[in-house]
Each structure stands twice: as structure tokens, then as C-alpha cells.
Image (cartoon, grey):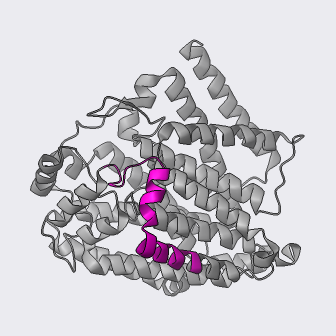
Amino acid sequence: MDPQLAALIFILFIIYLFWTDRKESDRPSNALWIPLTWMFIAGSRYVGEWLDLAPPKSANAYTEGSPVDAAVFFLLIAAGLFILFKRKIDWGRVLTQNKWVWLYFLYCAMSIIWADYSFVSFKRWIKELGNVVMIMVILTEKHPYEAIGVILRRLSFLWLPLSVLFIKYYPYLGRSYQRYSGAPMYTGIAGHKNYLGAMCLLSIIYFSWKYLLNRKERFRFANRGSINDLILMGMAAWLLDKAQSATSLACSVVSVSMFSVSRLAVISQKPGRIIALVTITFFLGLSLEATFGVKDTVIEFLGRNTSLTERVPMWETLMEMGTNPFVGAGFQSFWMGERLEKIWDALGVQFTQAHNGYLEQYLNLGYIGVAFIGVILLSGLFKVRNQLEVDYPAAMLRLCFIIAAVLYNYTEASFYGINNIWLLTLFGIFEISYQKKACDQYGEFISLSKEWK
């Protein structure tokens, strides 16, 4: 098929998806376009890359960043803050309910003091706060969990068809090649195959939650929306296979399995059991690894070598860079300047992350930063446990975001920066008092536990 004709067909299909969605669902707040735009950019390519204005890849360019992207993110943050200040939010409760998140960001701000490039770290810290602004815009919606569903669904309308179009008909945009082997690497509209995998992961989480757990939704062949979702799920599966991202594949399997298990009567009748099941599974996995070394078997099953595609040797090299073990190099400061050039020379590859979220935290923020991540994840689990009896599907979605992030960060680094895994991790952890007022006024948290008994 001619690429231009294919582009026209795909664009018309995307317009049809949005038109159908507008006709079949409640009209959400127009404010949702702000976090949707933020998440689209975070999941695909920055505006500078789309406009071909990104500077050539170098240590200096990575440190300074793109002024075009900085302006875009600043405008989105400003728009998000404008929306928040118009809404009646109990800011005192926002601080107390999420104290560990705010203490973590305060520690990140303090670490700017000992960073090598303090002003660059400060700018990155401001952008990092943009993630919080975006999730607060979502959580202060009248129906926040329907709102995150709308965003993920509409992102799927864009991410998936455009990625298929790029890979099949515009290979110079949707493919790249491995540096040493020359093998093709399918990226779609993302900048890397792993980012394409992350887009598929988020789409799979949404659709599996919608049809496996959300009692308001049923798959019906007579329903246009259901047929559209089926097509999009097929695209997500095809793209995930093309991406060859073992991390996203493993997280997708875990997410679908978790939603499926949560439908069982033994779990749904006493929702708190899902937390116990997750805890038991975690410690069982640790025991099996210590006793039988099952990790290598799982890695080989996913089609990867036991060095995790050379990640393990890279981790050893990074650990030898001599950062302060307690406080690290400073907020997002490890991959900068002479240290970055030294790493590139040692590895022979221009990495800009450790491909392990926990190691990344250690390098930038030391043991204290790693401890903060652990504490805020635990605080999120406690909040999910409290919500399970109130709104089971919403609580399970939050739990899935947290569990997926814990697993994802074993081979990718996403506990920082402008990326959707981190944003949705914060969404799973964060609470806003406005949300509970909305519950009283609009019945947002309608208890569905009786339907599961």
C-alpha cells in the first residue's frame, strides 16, 4: 500500500476512534487534555524530536537539554497549576496525606546543593514536579479513576495506530538498527524499542482492567467501542512482539494475571487478601531464587541471556564510579559532564540511564534516595489496602501501577524524570482530600464489593 494512502487511512481511523469515544462516554473535563498531552510526549518523543530540532547527541547536549522541550513542559506545568488553583483543594491535607512523597521531593531539592551542575539539577527538579501537577489535575476530577481511564484509552488511540503506521509504512521513522549487530529495532513513534514496549504495557493494563475488573464495562460485539478496543488490543500485542521488550512483556503478563486472580471469589469477597497474596508471592519468589536460582530460568524463558543483555557488566562499571554511597551525586546529576563522557568511553555505548531504577536512585541520591522510594511505595500499598473495601476496581488499578513499577525498574530506570511509568506510580500512591469531598458529593467511590460476593 502506498504510504500516503496508509497514512490517510490510519488518520481517519484515529479520528473515528475519538468520535466514537465522544459519542459513547461521558464528556470528561477539557482539563484532561493537559496531562494527556504531557503523557503523549513522555511516551513517544519530545517535541524537539518531532520537529527535528533536537541537538546532536553529545554529553554537553544531554546536560543542557533542548530549549524547545523546556518551553513546552513549562507551558504544560503552568496550565496544570492554573487548573489546580481554580479548584477547591485542601492543600494542607494534600501535604499530610502524601507526606512521604513531599519529603522525597524535598530531599531531591536539598541534593541540588551537592550536585555538579546545580542549575541543571534545579531545572530537572522543576520538570519532575510537573508529574505531580499532572496527577493532581487527574485526581481533582469529579471522577478521577474514570479520568485516568479516559486518558489511557485516548493515548492508545494515538500511540498504537501511529506506531503501526510508522513501522509498516514509514520505516525510517519507526525503525532503527542495533549499533553492533545491525539487527532492526522497532520503535514506532517512540524513541526506543523499550519505550514502545512501555506504551504497549500501559495500553494492556488499561484494557485488561476495563474488561477483567471494571464491572461497569462489558465486551459486546454489537458495541462499536468494544470492537475498537479489540482492534487496539490486537495492535498492542503485535507491537509488543515487534518491540521485543522482555521487561514490558513480563509486566504485561503479571498485570493481566493479577486482574484475573482478583476476580476469583476467594479474593473479591475479602479484597484485603490481594495484598497478602502479593506479599506471599514476593517472598516466595525471593525464596525460590535463593534456593533454586529461578531468575536465570525466567530470563532465558523471556529470550534474554542471564547478563540481561549486558546490563550486569554495565551495573558493575557504574558501581565503580565512586559516588557518595549515602547521598549520591545529586538529583539527576550522575549522567553529566566528564563523568558521562567517561562512562560512554568505558561502555562503548551512549547510555543515559542505569537500566535499573534502584541503582539509578543509588547513583543520584544514594542509599537515602533508595530508602525513600521504598517508603513511598509502601505508603502507597497501605493506601490501596484502605481503598480495597471502598472501590475495589480503582484500588486494583492503583495496585497494578505500583506492582508493575516495582518489576519494571529491575531492568529499566523509571523512578524519575518525564516518563509515564513514574507518573502512574505516583498516581497509585498519591491521595487528595478534594477526591474524598467529590466522593461525598457525587458518589465517586461507589462500593462494588457486594457485586463480587
Q: Can residue 40 be seen in this snapshot?
A: no
Please tell me which residue lies in front, 216 or 408: 408
**Residue 285 among magenta residues:** yes
**Placement of the N terminus among the 4 image quadrants:** top right
What is the residue that sits farthest to the top in this orientation? Answer: 2
Instruction: Tell me: residue 360, above or below residue 436.
Output: above
The secondary structure making up most of the magenta span is helix
Q: Is residue 82 visible?
A: yes
Compared across the picture, whether 399 is left or right of 443 comes to left
Question: Could you tell me which quadrant the C terminus lies in?
Answer: bottom right
Residue for point 46% across, 65% down? 294
Q: Quadrant of residue 4?
A: top right
Left/right of residue 113 with respect to residue 182 in the rendered view: left
Residue 305 x, y percent position in the rendering? 37, 50
| Residue 131 located within the stretch drawn in magenta | no
- Residue at position x 43%, y 46% from top? 194
Q: Residue at x 69, y 82 (%)?
A: 273
Q: In this view, does 409 lie above or below 222?
A: below
- Residue displayed at 28% across by 61% down: 123
Q: Quadrant of residue 436?
A: bottom right
Horizontal and vertical percent position of residue 76:
46, 54
Whole-percent x, y for residue 112 in the image:
22, 71
Could you tell whether 135 is left or right of 20 in the image? left
Residue stretch in magenta: 280-309
- Relative placement, left or right, of 404 versus 117 is right
4, above or below 416, in the image: above
The extreme right residue here reads: 222
Q: How many labels does the image show?
A: 0
Q: Which of 313 and 108 is in front in this view?
A: 313
Residue 177, how many percent across, how many down?
Answer: 34, 30
Q: Between 40 and 439, which is closer to the camera in this rendering? A: 40
